[in-house]
Image (cartoon, rainbow, N blue to C red):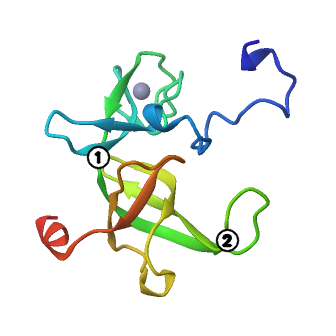
Amino acid sequence: MDTHDKPAGERPDDTMPNLDLGETERLVARTPLGEHTVMGGECGDCSARMAPSRPVCPNCGGTNIHPAALDSLGTLYSFSVVHVSATREVPYTIGYVDLPKNVRVLAAIDGDPAELRCDQVVRLVPDTGDGWRFAPASVEEKDMR
Ligand SMILES: [Zn+2]
């Protein structure tokens, strides 16, 4: 059954990142150099980028969306430590990561939460298994930005 056949309330929210197991291949791409990048979409009409990809462009309403390998480095916009969960081991950290060209993704964040800071540079962690996962970038990577 197509998910669009389900009544409202049972459909997955297409505007939110899907962190379910098994979605990793759709969420992460690998460049020819072996680097992992966030997989999303790019509008063929206005060049807006989005992650995850959507059938309709949130910027211009166009439907000419094609898959696009986005970036692996971003900045941590905000984060929170989750202490209660029915499905995951706690505590874990989740946050919004801003990628270049106005793309913001919700992702798990590795590292000691006491050491995390908003606006710090983070890198996509490969082999996520549960969606996008970022960790603080190395000093060298921060200098490259
Ligand atoms: Zn567009």
**Callout 1 amino acid:** Asp
Query: Is 125 or 49 nearer to us in this picture?
Result: 125
Query: Which of pointers 2 and 1 lies earlier in the amino acid sequence?
Result: 1
Question: Which element carries disc 2, helix, strand or loop?
Answer: loop
Closest to the camera, between mark 2 and mark 1, is: 2
State the residue at coordinates (54%, 48%): 130
Q: Residue at x 48, y 65 (%)?
A: 109
Classify 22 as above or below 105.
above
Quadrant of ligand 1 in image: top left
Q: Position of residue 123 (x, y in %)?
A: 31, 60
The numbered disc on residue 143 is none
Position of residue 67 measured from the top left corner of the image (x, y, whole percent): 37, 24
Question: Is 100 above or below relative to 139?
Answer: above
Q: Is residue 130 left or right of residue 2?
A: left
Residue at the image position 48 percent from the left and 87 percent from the top = 114
Percent x, y of residue 23: 54, 35
Q: Amino acid at mark 2?
A: Val
Label number found at residue 71: 1
- For residue 8, side relative to residue 133 (left or right): right
Find residue 6 and report its image quarter: top right
Distance from disc 2 to disc 1, alpha carbons, whole Å, reads 28 Å
- Going by the picture, which residue comes out furthest to the bottom? 114
Q: Is residue 140 left or right of residue 58?
A: left
Q: Quadrant of residue 36?
A: top left
Q: Secondary structure at mark 1?
A: loop
The image shows residue 78, relative to residue 19, as above or below, that is below
**Residue annotated with mark 2:** 90
Q: Residues within 10 Å of mark 1 (few under 14, many from 20)?
A: many
